[in-house]
Image (spheres, rainbow, N blue to C red):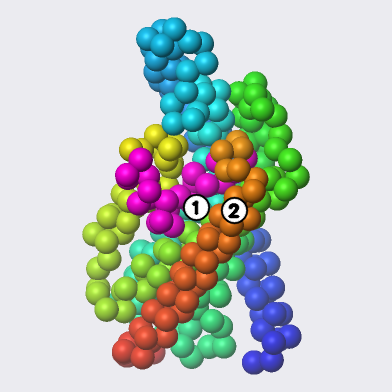
């Protein structure tokens, strides 16, 4: 297939997927607003923690892992934005099921790349999500504007933040897709998915800033790719990543992205060589 024709196919897939999701996903706005409700509990919880530490230290500006109380609330909001980009619900299990049920045969006989098709449908999903959910996000961030006490970051930092979100989305996709490709070798990947979700939940910074971890553990976690799914974008926005180190950190994230792209492609190529499909 010529490159221009391939681009036309990809654009058509993206437009079709986006149209489908805009039609049946009118619940995005309300669902997004509901997801922010646990933040209220987190605000009260961390207020109590910081208040107790402040009383013990006799200081009104206590910090935990380099985060003040206002920083902590802002961090949770930004981490939720990052996770909205990087989370890929149902992707790995869906790939494994298509392999197990034989649905993947259609991608082997039609001129549509399986991984590219999945990526485009996920891009459409995210676009539809943010088109609908931008209003709830804007409302929540407006109500919580006083917690962003340092204001907006500089243009280079803001560009780094946006770049980290895009790469976080791609890392999340190719990581999940690579796990799903294990379905070529094993019929069931549920247990592995559970373990990966557990690691991702704790080591991505979704629950708390990673700087709260013990120093030895933090050094290990910093070598893993999970932090780019939630912690890293939020830390960039809040100025926790020094500007002179930002380009280097983004290059490391890009290297992880390249690794997972190659890993996913390799697993798919090896998998279809051993795959056997029967029937119509």
Q: Is residue 264 positioned above or below 271 on the image?
A: above
- Is residue 44 visible in the rendered structure shown here? no
Q: Do the residues bearing badges 1 and 2 touch, measured as CB atoms within 8 Å?
A: yes
- Give the x, y percent position of residue 158: 70, 45
Residue 149 in the figure: left or right of residue 102? right
Q: Nearer the viewer, residue 44 or 272?
A: 44
Taking the spot 70% from the left edge, 80% from the top edge, the residue there is: 7
Neighbour tally class for label 1: few under 14, some 14-19, many 20 plus, Cα within 10 Å: many
Taking the spot 40% from the left edge, 56% from the top edge, the residue there is: 224
Q: Is residue 158 positioned above or below 273 on the image?
A: above
- Give the x, y percent position of residue 193: 31, 59
Neighbour tally class for label 2: few under 14, some 14-19, many 20 plus, Cα within 10 Å: many
Q: Which residues are magenta?
A: 215-237
Q: Which residue is mark 2?
A: 164
- Is residue 182 visible in the rendered structure shown here? yes
Q: Earlier in the sequence, mark 1 or mark 2?
A: 2
Taking the spot 31% from the left edge, 74% from the top edge, the residue there is: 183
Quadrant occupied by the N terminus: bottom right
Residue 259 in the figure: left or right of residue 23? left
């Amino acid at each position: 297939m010529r490159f221009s024709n391939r681009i036309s196919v990809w654009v058509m897939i993206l437009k079709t997927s986006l149209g489908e999701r805009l039609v049946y996903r009118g619940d995005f706005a309300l669902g997004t607003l509901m997801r922010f409700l646990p933040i209220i509990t987190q605000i009260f919880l961390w207020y109590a923690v910081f208040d107790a530490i402040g009383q013990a230290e006799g200081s009104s500006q206590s910090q935990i892992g380099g985060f003040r109380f206002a920083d902590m609330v802002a961090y949770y909001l930004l981490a939720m934005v990052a996770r909205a980009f990087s989370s890929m619900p149902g992707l790995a299990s869906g790939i494994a099921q298509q392999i197990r049920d034989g649905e993947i045969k259609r991608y082997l006989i039609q001129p549509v790349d399986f991984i590219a098709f999945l990526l485009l449908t996920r891009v459409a999903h995210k676009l539809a999500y943010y088109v609908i959910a931008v209003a709830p996000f804007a409302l929540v961030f407006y109500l919580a504007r006083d917690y962003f006490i340092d204001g907006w970051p500089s243009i280079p930092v803001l560009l780094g933040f946006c770049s980290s979100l895009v790469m976080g989305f791609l890392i999340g996709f190719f990581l999940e897709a690579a796990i799903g490709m294990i379905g070529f070798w094993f019929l069931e990947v549920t247990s592995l998915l559970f373990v990966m979700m557990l690691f991702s939940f704790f080591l991505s910074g979704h629950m708390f800033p990673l700087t709260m971890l013990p120093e030895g553990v933090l050094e290990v976690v910093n070598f893993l790719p999970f932090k780019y799914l939630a912690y890293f974008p939020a830390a960039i926005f809040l100025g926790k990543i020094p500007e002179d180190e930002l380009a280097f950190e983004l290059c490391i994230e890009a290297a992880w992205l390249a690794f997972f792209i190659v890993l996913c492609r390799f697993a798919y190529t090896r998998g279809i060589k051993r795959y056997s499909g029967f029937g119509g």
